[in-house]
Image (cartoon, rainbow, N blue to C red):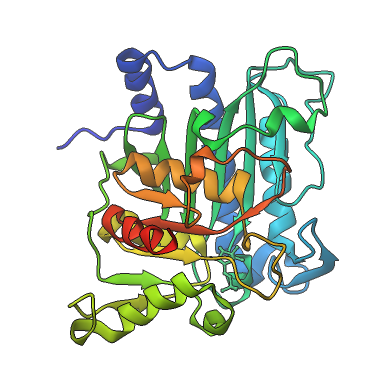
Amino acid sequence: MKMRISLTHYLIRSERAHGTDPNLRLLIETVARAVKTISHAVGKGALWGGNEGGVLGSLGSTNVQGETQKKLDVIANEILVEANEWGGHLAGMASEEMDTPVGIPVAYPRGHYLLLFDPLDGSSNVDVNVSIGTIFSVLPAPAGMSEDDDRAFLQPGRNQVCAGYAVYGPQTVLVLTLGHGVVAFTLDRDTGSFVLTQEDIRIPADTKEFAINMSNRRHWAQPVQRYIDECLAGRTGPRGKDFNMRWIASMVAEVHRIMQRGGIFLYPWDKREPDKPGKLRLMYEANPMAMLVEQAGGMATDGRQRILNIEPTQLHQRVSVMLGSRNEVEYVTGLHR
Ligand code: P6P
């Protein structure tokens, strides 16, 4: 029988092979445990907790993004904060659902890492039973940073020491990189452990599949309109091949598909709110996904520059995102030059 490699076994192998810090392993194992709890809550849907509608539906509140908060957004955020505040491996946490970073309670020791996350991405899909996910990013904590110093978090994505996501679909899959390639673990619900199911994920350099919200076409900048129109022209157009389209409205699910079979995902700037660079958030959506995509041989830009090189100025700043199969991202980025 083939030996099953657990998440802990993989991380200890990584410590021995690459000198990974054991505290980083403890952090990742803690996040994985929290992901299991979120997976359980997501899977309960309307059955959660016996109260009206379970975990489904909205709270009537809005988050710092001005977006309606789903019950599960808040539940997932609380699960991640509570799981990570006592372990001694973090100096602070930041979340899409919290206006400012949350410090570590004085009762607990501080660590050398910062954890940033979107606790439940794609939550507009919660009520319609479509895959959603958790995205997380780990940065080194600057020496001597003070508790609630936002600026400690404002580091370019290339500083990340770890990035990952969990996709809550027919399976719960945790996809992770520590800077030495991308691996995937599938949650074995019978034993409650994450089992290594993919090593060294590679994104094909070419693709015929694009993901974008086509309803925004009239608002896009000209290079994006041109790129998509060329895809739609298919084999009779300049690209000389037919394309397929997908749009799940859940970035984690789109990225996971690209990890499995290639593709390009775009959420570009559009003129509806010209001062906003894009819809997606840099620090806890674009940066972790960009690290994962690059580690899998793909590419991630904002249309002009490498996402991982963007110097952040605000914790919740947004960014235009084009990521996936390297040659396709090269092509659409080239149209912007
Ligand atoms: P739209 C989910 O809300 C999200 O942040 C991403 O996961 C997803 O790709 C995008 O927004 C969907 O946006 O405008 O198509 O609803």
The quarter of the picture where residue 114 lies is top right
Image quarter where the C terminus lies is bottom left
334 lies left or right of 78: left
Where residue 276 sits: x, y (%)? 69, 62
**Residue 335 appears anywhere in the view:** yes
Kindly identify the residue that appears in the image at 22 percent across and 60 percent down: 206
The quarter of the picture where residue 220 lies is bottom right
Kindly identify the residue that appears in the image at 48 percent across and 15 percent down: 21
Where residue 113 sits: x, y (%)? 62, 23
Report ligand 1 position as a quadrant: bottom right
Image quarter where the N terminus lies is top left
131 lies left or right of 190: right
Q: Residue furthest front?
A: 337
Q: Residue furthest left?
A: 1
Kindly identify the residue that appears in the image at 71 percent across and 24 percent down: 86
Up/down of 86 relative to 115, above or below: above
Decide which of 256, 34 is in the foreground and name it.
256
Decide which of 224, 67 is in the foreground and name it.
224
Where residue 261 sits: x, y (%)? 26, 60
Up/down of 271 relative to 116, above or below: below
Decide which of 2, 220 is in the foreground and name it.
220
Decide which of 263, 201 is in the foreground and name it.
263
Up/down of 225 relative to 204, above or below: below
